[in-house]
Amino acid sequence: MEQASVKIWLQAFRLRTLPLALSCIGMGAFLAADAAAFRWSVFLLCVATTVFLQILSNLANDYGDTVNGADNEHREGPRRTVQAGAISIGAMRMAIYIFIALCLGSGVSLLIVSFGLNWEAIGFFFGLGLLSIFAAIAYTVGRRPYGYIGLGDLSVLIFFGLVGVMGSYYLFTQRLAWTNVLPAMSCGFFSIAVLNVNNIRDIDSDRRAGKFSIPVRIGRKNAVVYHWVLITSGWTAALAYSFSHFVSVGQFIYLLSLPLFLRNGWAVATRPSSALDPYLKQMALSTLLFVALLGLVYSCSTLNHFVNRCVYIGSASRATPNINVVRYYTILYNP
């Protein structure tokens, strides 16, 4: 990669997609913090692995859609680098191989830090990681890319929802909490909504290229209805989780992000397909804000619990200083 082409490669990386990818990891991390199991080492490696996977997916998408003809002069939105001739097919293949290696290196490091010598858990999650790499590439690459037969939405629900949230939670805690299915589904539905905006934007060029995304299959009018269903389903899952873990009305602070989702749905319903590109980023950032606000509630709850314990220990130490030392180390090493 020449130094002069760094800007082009950054364009190919499509960094604006990263907030959505990091939303599911953020949700898993916040839930782990609520379970007093958050670790910075695990979190940072989760972030690195997720970023590498997302960029791998973007590069494979750039390559695959150009080879298969979906990226052409009729496509709405930013021009892809391979289709525009800014990056050669050979160079893009090499970049894909490099990011596969980065995913594997970061992923293996994450598993070792998370599980130590638990080879059974490492083996299972390594297989899950290989499946994630395959899904990132096979969406648009290969003889029969699953994104071309309308299965991209299901893949997003699985990997941006269930695997992203519950998998990252397990990496922190080494256990599953089935109630976390609800916030995982929220992330999944909102992530599908981002894909749906993309597919509605490209509905005409996809139809001509033989890419049968959900909007191509059901038509634009029904795709708008589908978009509202995704937004409503994501919010329903989030509210169900909050009511099932109800403590106070303050935990509904994430409702502050609701107008952004309504704005996105209204734009998809009323604007022409050619004008929808800005709403991909808007939906992705809305999802990230939703996760941040929802996570803030549980992080503050955990911090408050920690402070209360420290206050209790501090007051107890005046009478029994030796016990205080024992309890202090208990907080640090066995939260």
Image: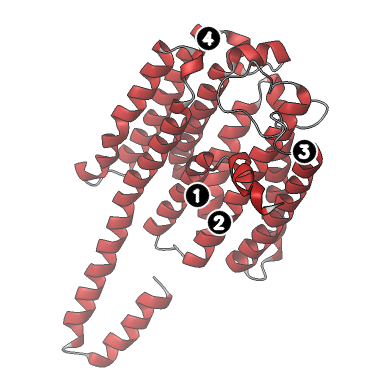
Among numbered discs 3 and 4, the one appearing first in the sequence: 3
Q: In 3D space, how far apart are the residues under numbered discs 1 and 2 (Cα atoms)?
A: 7 Å
Among numbered discs 2 and 4, the one appearing first in the sequence: 2
Asked if residue 82 is positioned above or below residue 268 in the image, the reply reads: below
Which amino acid does the dot numbered 4 rest on?
A: Arg
Which amino acid does the dot numbered 3 rest on?
A: Ser
Cβ atoms under marks 3 and 2 closer than 8 Å? no
Q: Which mark is residue 88?
A: 3
Q: Quadrant of the C terminus?
A: bottom left
Q: Is residue 174 visible?
A: no
Which amino acid does the dot numbered 2 rest on?
A: Cys
Which residue bears the numbered disc 2? 46
Among numbered discs 1 and 2, the one appearing first in the sequence: 1
Cβ atoms under marks 1 and 2 closer than 8 Å? yes
Q: In 3D space, how far apart are the residues under numbered discs 3 and 1 (Cα atoms)?
A: 33 Å
* Mark 3: few/some/many CA within 10 Å (<14, 14-19, 20+): some
